[in-house]
Image (cartoon, rainbow, N blue to C red):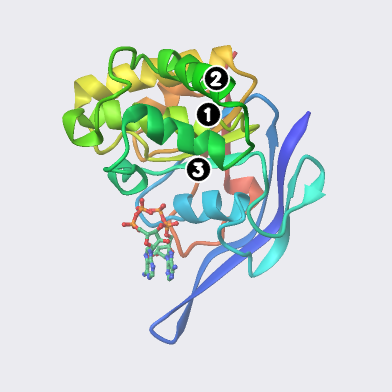
Amino acid sequence: ETIIEVRGIRKVYAVNQTALTVFDGLSYKIGRGSFLSIIGPSGCGKSTLLKLISGLETPSGGEVFFNGRRIDGPPKGMIYVFQQYTKSIFPWRTVLQNIRFGLDSQKSLPAREAHEKCMEYVKLVGLQGYENYYPYQLSGGMQQRVVIARALICEPDVLLMDEPFSAVDAMTRAILQELILKIWSTLPITVLFVTHDVDEAVFLSNRIVSLGRAPATVREDVAIDLAYP
Ligand code: ADP
Ligand code: ADP
């Protein structure tokens, strides 16, 4: 079953009064529940593709469908995790308060239920005992866990991650990779994962799309799609 469809998408940026064509008719379908990695060299359009899918960028042509509906701006049910986690975390809020923020932006639960739900996600990302710590008291990997918990507490259908682990050291990255695999197998979620690390893509995902070098014309027939069992 298709959850996201990119249909004939074009994206042209204006750079120094010249047009930079990143996509020129890209079509692709993403299955519900898949863990899709998007790989390719720096500047090929990985982030742009993720932003087009999530409605953060508007296509110059073509359409994006989410759950069968054409998107027109950021849809509910998709949530974004960026590489620069320090930019999306509130330094003046504790771990629990940061995670709680994800919940508040969605719906208003009674205080007790909200607290219990936050604690559930604290556990999911392995931050028990750190609820009342402030971000500066945490390692980079722990801060990224806070960001992941805050994203997941909204119960999104789709988690979009743009090089989420490239700012942490190799040991931490391995632990976060295990965590995201656990999350993917626990929750009914579709993950779109941008990385320039082929090993990471192969380790994590059950499907990989490889984009060519921009400003190449990227068409469906040049997108490599490897399916793993
Ligand atoms: P990747 O994520 O694969 O590194 P990006 O999607 O960030 O690639 O960028 C693709 C190309 O589009 C790059 O050449 C980049 O400089 C350009 N680009 C991205 N965003 C913008 C923008 N807002 N304005 C102009 N050019 C952009
Ligand atoms: P990444 O490789 O993770 O996309 P970058 O540092 O290349 O990160 O880009 C950071 C952001 O700046 C991107 O999300 C993109 O939208 C924007 N950007 C990239 N290139 C340009 C550009 N030439 N002009 C304006 N914005 C850009």
**Residue 172 in the image, given as x and y percentages of width and height:** 24, 22
Q: Position of residue 196 (x, y in %)?
A: 36, 40
Mark 2 and mark 3 in contact (Cβ < 8 Å)? no
On the rendered structure, is 57 left or right of 144?
right
- Please state if 65 lies on the left or on the right of 80 as rendered: right
Labels 3 & 1 near each other (Cβ < 8 A)? no
Residue at the image position 38 percent from the left and 27 percent from the top = 96
Measured Cα–Cα span from mark 3 to mark 1: 10 Å
| Residue beneath disc 1 | 152
* In this rendering, position of residue 86 left or right of residue 64: left
Quadrant containing ligand 2 reads bottom left
Compared to residue 217, the image places residue 229 above or below, namely above
User: Which residue is painted at 38% across and 15% down in the image?
Assistant: 178
Placement of 190 over or under 127, stated as above or below: below
Q: How many residues crowd around disc 2 within 10 Å: few (fewer than 14), some, or many (20 or more)?
A: few
Tag nearer the camera, 2 or 1: 2
Q: Which label was assigned to residue 80?
A: 3
Number of numbered discs visible in the structure rendering: 3
